[in-house]
Amino acid sequence: MNKVTTVSTATVSTAAVSTAVVSTTASTTQAGGVSLNPSRSAPVKTVADHQVDWRVYLTLTKPKVVALMILTALVGMCLAVPGALPLQQTIMGLLGIALMAGSAAAFNHLIDRRIDGIMARTHKRPLPSGELSVLKVSVFASGIGVAGFVILAAIVNWLTAWLTFASLLGYAVVYTLYLKRATPQNIVIAGIAGAMPPLLGWTAVTGELHANAWLLVMIIFIWTPPHFWALAIHRKDDYAKADIPMLPVTHGVEYTKTSILLYTILLALVCLMPALVGMTGLLYLIGSTGLSAGFIYYAWKLKYAANNKTAIETFKFSIIHLMVLFVVLLVDHYLPI
């Protein structure tokens, strides 16, 4: 009778089979006169242990990237209005933009699952590791994308909703599905999609496009290639193994280093433009100049005095550069000098 019960339980899950085998073995051994302590047996996972943690879904949205995008969108909002921000448009605008940005990131995971499984940097992501199925990721990405669009369209304004949707398509479809595999200039062409958050923030609270907002977009657009190429140098072998035509793979590391240095110089000039057009004050001018000098220093070091850590150090500094630059924009707006 005990054996029948064990077999019946085993049909519930693989984990239960393991438990039944251990229990049966222990009972048989005790019958032979040898006592085994079941508490010393290795713990066996149950069905509940295989339930997906919400944090796995969170990783699909690339939360650190989205957080930086939301910061730039918030700065766009703040610079768009002279006084206090409209509370509803601000909160709902940031929520809608964050949801659609997270949706784009999740679709990126979905489309790139084969490549992610090949690359050392990404092989532990939810899809290649088997933590989530294609269906679950598809439903999740579509769900938060639709939710974000509805929030923006119904509560904020249609302009922001459609611009955010265009950004989602630009990153998830145009870049991930086509450009990434088609040309070494993939990140340059598609960089506009990732550069849109300041404009989205601006339109969320004003309902209109403005030249100053496009200037903020230009800063991120020029910042993107040297930021990403530094990572591509560090992970060159990974991209080559996955047959992705990133610039270091197709044109060599030295060519890429030169491109990074030239782009950081161009970025320094673009970062001066908000001060030159009267959009910002002295505080921003000083801050942006210092940050640009730091980025150029890292790019110069990468080109002429690199070690095996310089590329990833340049990549990390580029993130600090953009984050601090937009914080300085915000401080300068409220504390003009």
Image: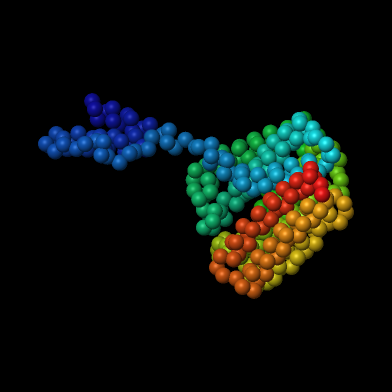
- Residue visible at 41% across and 34% down in the picture: 47
If the image is split into quadrants, where does the N terminus sit?
top left
Q: Is residue 252 above or below residue 337?
A: below
| Residue 8, image x, y percentages | 32, 29
- Residue visible at 83% across and 56% down in the picture: 273
Scheme by which the image is coloured: rainbow
| Residue 189, image x, y percentages | 75, 58
Is residue 206 visible in the rendered structure shown here? Answer: yes
Q: Is residue 211 left or right of residue 162?
A: right
| Residue 297, image x, y percentages | 68, 66
- Residue visible at 88% across and 54% down in the picture: 277
The image quarter containing residue 96 is: top right
Which residue is at the front of the view, 279 or 37? 279
Is residue 162 visible in the rendered structure shown here? Answer: no
The image quarter containing residue 161 is: top right
Q: Outermost residue toward the top? A: 1
Which residue is at the front of the view, 264 or 151? 264
How many numbered dots are placed on residues in this image? 0
Q: Outermost residue toward the front? A: 337
| Residue 198, image x, y percentages | 77, 46
Q: Is residue 251 above or below residue 117?
A: below
Q: Is residue 91 above or below residue 168?
A: above
- Residue visible at 64% across and 58% down in the picture: 317
Q: Is residue 194 left or right of residue 43?
A: right
